[in-house]
């Protein structure tokens, strides 16, 4: 806001300096070190990206730098913000620092704001925490901040409660709170991870613009290499609580020196943007003449009644053919998960027909319908919720056998379970373990084993890897496609990740607001999209190459400026 | 959902609940051997007397007919006539109900005013000695039968210390009741004790849960002090589930009033009900249960509406 | 109080499942909760006291002994004697048996009824759920003490009858609880997966929903027993109690009420404390179990 309010600019030195920072968590199973001897600095006006997979300690560093660690964490070493030591500082000194010299933006906009306080008040609170202004002035300033972060009708929106705003708008409010007192340092912890890709692009543009305008130093914590390429000046790569590599963004992303960085970058699915590196599997790209294993014809789904009715799907027709993978892509609320659940028969269509293996599900008797379902395998998104924690891994995998092959002896069942565990490349011994002892990637492979134990003709996978780290995602996707080659099942693959779909599916359906925007062979549709919507979607995906991404960003902004419809977050 | 359609739906639900209550109570009263007549006329009554009584009272008609007859009377505000007091039940209840409401509302207010700060205070001192002590005391208060607590209160504060009278105010009108405020102290304390226990535990849990919410971290990151966060954000957010709980607590309060009124001889509806039970005065029993049920359902409805007012998400159907 | 709410339960989320390692973790968490461990000790003590105690400390609880009425505590009668000359300490053991048995049985019965009702309502959903829950609302709208008093005007039940009546006035709270649990469990991914591949409703309920509700049910049952013991204490006061010479703690307390004004404190303090201690102990155990299983919902 006002330049006079800026805190005293630090001497030319870094605005944030960590030196030998360590963090140890005290848990029920003893002391767990999360961060070990991390040293880094952020200079005014620069953006340092802290990247790593889950559990690498990157978010812990962000919280430690703000003195926001939870009670069971203990920090050692040094973390200095604009000359103030944070480690071991008193809470009142930290409060004076937070929101003024250093601010933070969090991952989850859904929960980051007080649900019962109007957003304008929440922003005003941060202003009044540090500046002696009247409530009225603060309210006026809050409106100005909302305008600055790109919220339409800020006067009206200031009186809104968080739940009345979209995820992107909520994140803008959190950003408005963070910049309310023109901080010298902004720490952004996965600021776009919970957002759709088009919203992500807008939020990144906003953060970049704000940081550039005020010369704010930014510590950007993220797992997304595309975001790093889009935003960062320098990169620090974390692995198991330590920094393994630091350097300018071009060096780290294009010429990584550490093994781990190379592996990490190798696992990132890259969106192909030119014909030359056409990555989509060419096989069976055109709809074959075979009878589809699953078909939705003019399906609409309406939830609720009367004024509250929500049309989740509207006239959707699609077909999955034998041996083929159909990718279903779209942003949140597009209806992609609903469509997959209709195909599974978990949601009955309000109108239209669904057929499985040539039989109309709406007409089949319940016994026949159950028999049909022996031909389906399912993998859902959440690795924790997908397996019943009370069962052993073996029991989980054997469940479809118990449903459909009741006559099977215990011995045969065990050997089938062992065989399918082999196929998903899990050790057989895992059969006797509890799901909670497994990692996320292992659990998703157990889900896959359960889905494939009956050798189904159709696999429905709803965001099967989106909760996983990229390296684990790669391994799981590899297993799926290998088994698909061996067993020849068709696959309905739901994902928000265009790059993954491009690599994995032969055909793609783009959904938006319950309607099909376009569909076709992946190679065609995702390289030469016919609709502005798909084009915008593709343009918003950041690619993990800073040079290419700079160009894409310029193109996208030019296209937006040229008057294309901008979908406000 | 709009407020009017929400209200309409909630009121309809409440009416359904009341109708079920009337069926249950009606069925319960007609399940007794010999029917209400035997209860009124006593074991010595002859068969002829019973038949005559049943005929006079319409008790020889089929049960569904009696039920609809009864419903029709209800709609016209007629709850029947007390067998023993020879007064219309509706009149008896109109006289007594305000006093019971006064007692329960006072107990609830005293209970909440003490319980809410206590629960927050405990949450701030989680797992420290003070927290353990209050938790233990809360459980003890919750575990004490109201009549035992009342008795101990009377023995200590009335018999031994002579601070307060052992009888509640005896006046017929609310003004007369208010004329003896010191006589209300012990009944209100007895009624409020378990409420303090329940709601301090409840507020403690809600506060702890809210203290670990993300928005608290956001507020801290914005430089807000702990005390400001507690009062500006955590307090309000913790209060919402407590208000919802208050709706469920209404029947407990009435149950407590039943015992407290009997114990302190306070002429409210609880005492009326108690006396009616001793003399098998079924019209009074039936009327009281119905009124208590309506009061409970109304209380729950009010709590829902209050929750809707203080939590904008509920209104939007998002919570 | 009638059984509607217990202290400090926020309606809410899921339950930690009871797996092998989950159980170990739960035991560890429970043992760290000192109040709960003390509660367990208190319950164990009272069971020994009531069921083994009479073998060691034998008293006459059937005959009226008019020559030793209302004696103050002394060397020969540690807790004195009551209005008909029974030794109060012995009577505490004798009455405790009834209180504990009725409380346990009624609490378990209420939990069983509530579990079945709530599970069916929650799993069926739709109008079946709506109707079943309106019945629960109606039940909650009449305070249990009022129902018990109406029943006492009609009949005097035997021990089994008492258990059944208490069970039937207190199943409402567990039913709401289990319904909420079922609603959340039936939309878990593993249940959806089972349904999608053609698993039956029966399988979903028996293999997934019930086993995963076990910790919630156990916690509910513990609180329910606490409530039932408290309710038993009201029963004699309301005129529904067991008939002399048999008794329970509530009966001792009611019988001693008037005598207390004459200074015979030993007639009411021991049974009063016994009730408070046992109910407190079951509540503390329930609290510990809830934290140990991470069951958050109740109410």
Image (cartoon, rainbow, N blue to C red):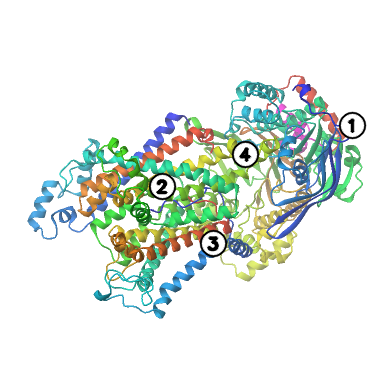
- Position of residue C248 relative to residue B64, above or below, is below
**Closer to the eye: label 2 or 1:** 2
Specify few, some or many for label 3: CA neighbours under 10 Å numbering under 14, 14-19, or 20 or more: many
Which residue reaches farthest front? B161
- Tag 3 secondary structure: helix
**Is residue A36 something that shows in the picture?**
yes
**Closer to the eye: label 2 or 3:** 2
Q: Circle 1 sits on which residue?
A: A12
Confirm whether circles 4 and 1 share one chain: no
Which residue reaches farthest top? A563
Q: Circle 2 sits on which residue?
A: B192
Specify few, some or many for label 2: CA neighbours under 10 Å numbering under 14, 14-19, or 20 or more: many
Q: Quadrant of the C terminus of chain A?
A: top right
When asked about the image quadrant of residue A153, the answer is top right
Specify few, some or many for label 4: CA neighbours under 10 Å numbering under 14, 14-19, or 20 or more: few
Q: Nearer the viewer, residue A438 or A76?
A: A76
Q: Please tell me the numbered disc located at residue B227.
A: 4
Q: Circle 3 sits on which residue?
A: C36
**Is residue B252 something that shows in the picture?**
no
C199 falls in the magenta region: no
A535 falls in the magenta region: yes
Which residue reaches farthest left? B48
- Closer to the chain start, of discs 4 and 2, is 2
Give me the C-alpha separation between circle 3 and circle 1: 58 Å
Give me the C-alpha separation between circle 2 and circle 1: 64 Å
- Tag 2 secondary structure: helix
């Amino acid at each position: 806001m006002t330049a006079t309010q800026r805190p005293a600019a630090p001497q030319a030195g870094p605005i944030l300096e960590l030196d030998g920072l360590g963090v140890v968590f005290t848990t029920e199973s003893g002391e767990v070190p999360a961060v070990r001897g991390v040293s880094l600095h952020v200079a005014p006006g620069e953006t340092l990206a802290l990247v790593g997979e889950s559990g690498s300690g990157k978010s812990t560093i962000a919280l430690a730098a703000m003195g926001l660690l939870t009670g069971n964490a203990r920090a050692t070493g040094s973390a200095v913000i604009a000359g103030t030591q944070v480690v071991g500082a008193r809470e009142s000194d930290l409060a004076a620092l937070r929101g003024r010299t250093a601010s933070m933006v969090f991952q989850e906009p859904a929960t980051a704001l007080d649900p019962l306080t109007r957003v304008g008040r929440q922003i005003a609170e941060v202003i009044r925490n540090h500046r002696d202004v009247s409530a009225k002035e603060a309210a006026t300033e809050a409106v100005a901040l909302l305008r600055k972060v790109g919220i339409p009708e800020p006067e009206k929106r200031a009186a809104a409660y968080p739940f009345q705003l979209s995820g992107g708008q909520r994140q803008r409010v959190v950003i408005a709170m963070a910049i309310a007192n023109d901080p010298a340092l902004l720490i952004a912890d996965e600021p776009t991870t919970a957002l759709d890709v088009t919203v992500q692009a807008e939020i990144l543009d906003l953060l970049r613009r704000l940081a550039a305008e005020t010369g704010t130093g930014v510590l950007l914590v993220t797992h997304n290499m595309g975001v790093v390429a889009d935003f960062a000046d320098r990169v620090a790569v974390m692995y198991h609580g330590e920094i393994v590599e630091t350097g300018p963004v071009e060096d780290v992303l294009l010429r990584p020196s550490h093994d781990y960085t190379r592996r990490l970058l190798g696992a990132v699915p890259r969106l192909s943007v030119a014909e030359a590196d056409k990555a989509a599997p060419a096989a069976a790209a055109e709809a074959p003449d075979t009878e589809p294993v699953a078909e939705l014809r003019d399906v609409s789904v309406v939830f609720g009644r009367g004024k509250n009715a929500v049309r989740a799907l509207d006239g959707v027709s699609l077909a999955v053919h034998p041996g083929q993978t159909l990718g279903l892509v779209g942003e949140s609320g597009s209806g992609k998960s609903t469509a997959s659940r209709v195909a599974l028969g978990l949601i009955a269509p309000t109108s239209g027909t669904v057929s499985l293996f040539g039989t109309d599900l709406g007409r089949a008797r319940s016994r026949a319908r159950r028999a049909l379902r022996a031909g389906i395998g399912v993998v859902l998104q959440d690795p924790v919720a997908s397996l019943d924690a009370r069962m052993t891994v073996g029991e989980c995998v054997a469940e479809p056998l118990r449903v459909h092959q009741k006559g099977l002896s215990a011995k045969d069942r065990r050997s089938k379970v062992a065989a399918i565990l082999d196929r998903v490349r899990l050790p057989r011994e895992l059969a006797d373990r509890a799901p909670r002892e497994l990692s996320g990637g292992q659990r998703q492979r157990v889900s896959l084993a359960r889905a494939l134990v009956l050798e189904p003709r159709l696999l429905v996978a709803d965001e099967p890897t989106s909760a996983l780290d990229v390296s684990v995602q790669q391994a799981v996707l590899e297993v799926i496609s290998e088994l698909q080659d061996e067993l020849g099942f068709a696959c309905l693959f739901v994902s928000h990740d265009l790059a993954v779909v491009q690599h994995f599916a032969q055909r793609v359906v783009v959904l938006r607001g319950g309607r099909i925007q376009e569909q076709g062979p992946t190679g065609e549709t995702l390289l030469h999209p016919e609709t502005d919507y798909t084009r915008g979607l593709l343009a918003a995906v950041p690619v993990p190459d800073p040079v290419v991404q700079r160009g894409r960003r310029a193109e996208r902004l030019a296209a937006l400026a040229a008057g294309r419809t901008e979908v406000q977050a | 959902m709009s407020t009017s359609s929400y209200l309409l739906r909630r009121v309809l639900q409440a009416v359904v609940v009341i109708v079920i209550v009337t069926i249950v109570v009606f069925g319960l009263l007609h399940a007794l051997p010999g029917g209400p007549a035997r209860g009124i006329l006593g074991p010595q009554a002859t068969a002829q007397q019973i038949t005559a009584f049943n005929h006079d009272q319409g008790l020889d008609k089929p049960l569904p007919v009696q039920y609809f007859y009864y419903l029709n009377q209800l709609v016209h505000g007629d709850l029947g006539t007390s067998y023993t007091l020879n007064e219309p039940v509706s009149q008896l209840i109109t006289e007594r109900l305000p006093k019971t409401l006064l007692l329960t509302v006072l107990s609830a207010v005293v209970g909440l005013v003490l319980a809410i700060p206590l629960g927050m205070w405990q949450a701030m001192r989680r797992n420290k000695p003070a927290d353990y002590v209050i938790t233990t005391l809360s459980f003890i208060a919750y575990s004490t039968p109201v009549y035992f607590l009342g008795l101990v209160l009377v023995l200590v504060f009335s018999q031994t210390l002579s601070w307060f009278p052992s009888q509640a105010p005896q006046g017929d009108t609310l003004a007369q009741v208010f004329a003896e405020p010191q006589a209300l102290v012990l009944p209100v304390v007895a009624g409020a004790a378990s409420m303090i226990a329940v709601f301090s535990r409840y507020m403690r849990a809600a506060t702890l849960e809210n203290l670990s919410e993300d928005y608290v971290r956001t507020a801290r990151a914005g430089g807000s002090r702990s005390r400001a966060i507690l009062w500006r954000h955590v307090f309000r957010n913790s209060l919402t589930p407590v208000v919802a709980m208050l709706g469920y607590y209404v029947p407990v309060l009435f149950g407590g009033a039943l015992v407290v009124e009997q114990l302190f001889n306070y002429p409210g509806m609880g005492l009326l009900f108690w006396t009616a039970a001793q003399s098998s005065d079924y019209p009074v029993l039936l009327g009281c249960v119905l009124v208590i049920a309506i009061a409970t359902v109304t209380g729950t409805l009010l709590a829902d509406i209050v929750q809707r007012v203080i939590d904008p998400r509920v209104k939007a159907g998002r919570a | 109080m009638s059984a509607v709410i217990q202290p400090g339960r926020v309606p809410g989320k899921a339950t930690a499942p009871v797996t092998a390692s989950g159980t170990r973790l739960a035991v560890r968490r429970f043992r760290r909760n000192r109040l709960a461990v003390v509660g367990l000790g208190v319950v164990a003590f009272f069971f020994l006291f009531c069921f083994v105690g009479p073998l060691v400390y034998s008293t006459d609880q059937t005959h009226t002994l008019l020559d030793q009425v209302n004696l103050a505590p002394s060397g020969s009668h540690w807790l004195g004697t009551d209005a008909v000359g029974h030794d109060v300490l012995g009577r505490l053991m004798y009455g405790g048996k009834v209180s504990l048995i009725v409380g346990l049985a009624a609490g378990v019965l209420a939990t069983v009824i509530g579990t079945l009702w709530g599970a069916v309502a929650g799993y069926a959903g739709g109008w079946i759920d709506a109707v079943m829950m309106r019945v629960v609302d109606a039940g909650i709208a009449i305070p249990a003490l009022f129902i018990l008093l109406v029943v006492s005007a009609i009949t005097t039940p035997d021990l089994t009858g008492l258990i059944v009546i208490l069970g039937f006035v207190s199943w409402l709270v567990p039913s709401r609880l289990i319904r909420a649990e079922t609603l959340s469990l039936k939309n878990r991914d593993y249940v959806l997966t089972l349904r999608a591949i053609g698993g039956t409703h029966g399988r979903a309920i028996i293999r997934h929903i019930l086993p995963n509700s076990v910790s919630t049910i156990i916690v509910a049952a513990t609180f329910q027993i606490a409530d039932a013991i408290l309710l038993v204490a009201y029963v004699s006061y309301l005129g529904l109690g067991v008939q002399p010479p048999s008794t329970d703690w509530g009966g001792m307390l009611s019988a001693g009420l008037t005598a207390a004004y004459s200074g015979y404190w030993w007639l009411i303090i021991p049974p009063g404390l016994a009730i408070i201690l046992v109910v407190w102990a079951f509540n503390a155990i329930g609290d510990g179990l809830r934290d140990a299983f991470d069951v958050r919902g109740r109410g």
